[in-house]
Each structure stands twice: as C-alpha cells, then as structure tokens.
C-alpha cells in the first residue's frame, strides 16, 4: 500500500457529484460521475467547463504558480473525471507535484493516472519516473532540521517499488525494483524480509543482471540471522547452503573471496554446534547410544573438522560399550 493512498479520495464523492450536477445548467459539458476527494462542497473549479479549466491551470503552471496550478488540475479531475482533458490534467497534476518535489504525492498521482486513464500516456515513461521517485525516497534522509542531518528511512520506498511491480511485473526494470525492495529491507535491518525479497529476484528473474547480487545479499542476510541466533542450526545450515550455492554458481564474482570466507566460517560454526551436541549426550546427559549416533553424524558431515579426530576416538570407545548395553537388554 502507498503511504496515504490518494489524498482521502473516498470522501465527499456525493457532495462533489452533487455540486457538478447543480451547476450543470450553466456548463456545456455534463459529467455523469465525479472523482471523490477531500475538497469540500464549497471549493469550486475556477472555470465553468473542463476546457477552460485546463487552459487556466496551464496558465498558472506556465507562470510558476505551481501550487495553484496543482489545485486547479485536481479540481478538473474531481469535477470532470470523464472529460477529454482529464487524463492530461491528471498527468499535469503529477508533473507539477513532481516539480515541487512532493515525491509521495507525485508518485500517488502517477499511480492514479495509470489506474484510471490507461492508454492515454507513455506507460514506460511514467514507470521510469516512479522508479526515480522511489529511489529518491529510498536515499533521502527524513526529519532534517537545522544542523541535524535527519535519519535514513529506506523502508518508505518499499511500497513504492511494490506498486511499480504491480503495474509492471514484466517491465525492464522490474528485477531491479524487486532487488531494491530487498536492499531497503536490508538497510532497515529487516533481514528476514530482505531474504524473501532477494529470493523472489532469483525465482522470478533468474537471468537478470540482479540475480547475482540478490544471491549474494540473500546469503549475507542469512548469515546475519545466523549471528543473531547462534544456536539455530536450521538458520546456520540455510546460510551455509546459500553461500555454497553462490560460490558454485558465480565463481568469477567480485564477492567470491568474501563469500568463501563466510562459507568456511559458517562451516566451522556448524561443525562446532554439531560436536557440542554430541558432547552433551556424551558427558552431560550420559546417553552413550545417543552420543555415538551424534558423533557418527558429526564425522559424516564434517570429516575435515578440527574436532573430527576426537569424535572418531569417542566413536571407537563408545561403540563396544553401546554394543554391550544393547546385548544386555536383549538378554533380559
């Protein structure tokens, strides 16, 4: 969802429609529907018909009265949404807000244009501009005041990229949009959401230029989740698998050295966790049969671990003991 949808467009639809119908006797153009908006019953377009209203709004725009121009363009689309001039007015409204750097509002009005006036504009151009706005929102600091630089809030761009993907899932920059959703979540420390976003890039756009980076950053986020949950074997395993797959698929990647280092570190951590589990059954729980099974599993999965010789020694010591215990149970 976009942060505030279309500025309360669902309010007072009946009032606006009623106002349009009341004045219809003095207007050459009649509108059968009206676009709902927060403008109250007393706000009226400056002119009596959409043609003159559009020309008037254009004049305001051309004389740099941008705020007033935006108001009059919006009133045209509110009172005459089916007029021939309405699509152009809607586009002009979005452009004016864009020029005023009202990024969220401009994005919202471009979205309204796409959803209500399809086929009346250059589709890819509008998606491109929305993409640029989303990038700006992602990188612009929020809450600047005096000497305070403000704070980064990249998550604000996520619903914008999602809306672009909704309208253009096969657009040329769709893979990049999906990748940037992952990056925004990663910047916001939402690593689980970033992992899901990066995986979507790999599934939907496996041949895109962003697949390699998505695979790498997915592995990085999984590794960070593993750091946060050092005893969670499933997360450790998933992180190691992601890095292992990355190394195998992208052997010429610029991130190969970093990926190899992280993969080997994860392997050591996985081995240590598995060995500790075997040691627990061996020395604390005093369950030799379970300990033997865990040691064997450890040796099978981590044959080159530093702890493998000790595990092999305990297997040789425990095997006769477990065999004796099992035989004694059978005799009973």
Image (cartoon, grey):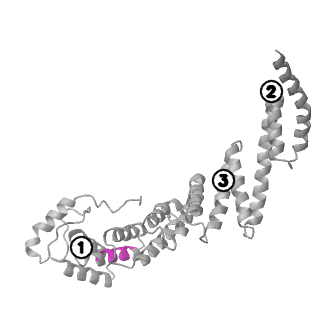
Q: Does residue 173 appear to the left or right of 296 in the view shown?
A: left
Q: How many numbered marks appear?
A: 3
The extreme left residue here reads 25
Q: Nearer the viewer, residue 186 or 173?
A: 173
Q: Quadrant of residue 139?
A: bottom right
Q: Is residue 227 visible?
A: no
* Residue at image point 31% right, 69% down: 116
Q: State the residue position of label 2.
A: 287
Q: Position of residue 222 (x, y in %)?
A: 66, 53
The answer to whether one can see residue 11 in this image is yes
Image quadrant occupied by the C terminus: top right
Decide whether the magenta segment is chiefly helix, strand or loop.
helix
- Labels 1, 2: front one: 2
The span picked out in magenta is: 89-97
Place residue 25 in its image quadrant.
bottom left
| Sooner in the amino-acid sequence: mark 1 or mark 2 | 1
**Which callout, 3 or 2, points to the residue nearer the camera?**
2
Residue 155 in the image, given as x and y percentages of width and height: 51, 59
Q: Which mark is residue 222?
A: 3
Q: Residue at x 22, y 75 (%)?
A: 83
What residue sits right under mark 1 in the picture?
Answer: 76
Element under label 3?
Answer: helix
- Secondary structure under tag 2 reads loop
Most extreme residue toward the top is 332
Percent of width and height locating residue 53: 21, 78
Residue at image point 83% right, 33% down: 292
């Amino acid at each position: 969802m976009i942060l505030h949808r279309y500025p309360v467009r669902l309010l007072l639809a009946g009032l606006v429609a009623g106002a349009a119908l009341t004045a219809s006797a003095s207007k050459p153009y009649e509108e059968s529907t009206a676009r709902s908006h927060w403008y109250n019953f007393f706000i009226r377009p400056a002119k009596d018909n959409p043609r003159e209203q559009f020309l008037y709004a254009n004049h305001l725009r051309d004389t740099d009265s941008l705020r007033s121009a935006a108001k009059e363009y919006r009133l045209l689309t509110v009172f005459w949404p089916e007029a021939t001039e309405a699509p152009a007015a809607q586009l002009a409204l979005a452009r004016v807000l864009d020029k005023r750097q009202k990024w969220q509002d401009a994005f919202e009005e471009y979205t309204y244009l796409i959803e209500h006036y399809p086929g009346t504009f250059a589709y890819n151009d509008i998606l491109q501009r929305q993409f640029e706005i989303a990038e700006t929102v992602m990188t612009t600091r929020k809450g600047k005041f005096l000497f305070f630089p403000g704070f980064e809030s990249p998550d604000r761009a996520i619903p914008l990229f999602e809306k672009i993907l909704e309208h253009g899932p096969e657009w040329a920059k769709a893979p990049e949009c999906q990748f940037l959703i992952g990056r925004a979540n990663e910047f916001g420390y939402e690593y689980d959401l970033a992992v899901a976003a990066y995986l979507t890039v790999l599934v939907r756009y496996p041949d895109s230029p962003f697949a390699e980076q998505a695979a790498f950053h997915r592995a990085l986020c999984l590794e960070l989740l593993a750091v946060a949950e050092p005893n969670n074997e499933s997360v450790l395993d998933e992180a190691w698998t992601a890095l292992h797959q990355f190394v195998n698929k992208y052997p010429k990647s610029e991130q190969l050295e970093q990926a190899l280092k992280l993969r080997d570190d994860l392997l050591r951590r996985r081995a240590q966790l598995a060995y500790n589990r075997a040691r627990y059954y061996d020395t604390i729980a005093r369950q030799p049969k379970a300990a033997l099974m865990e040691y064997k599993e450890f040796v099978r999965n981590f044959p080159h671990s530093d702890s493998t010789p000790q595990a092999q020694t305990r297997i040789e010591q425990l095997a006769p003991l477990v065999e004796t215990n099992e035989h004694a149970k059978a005799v009973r």
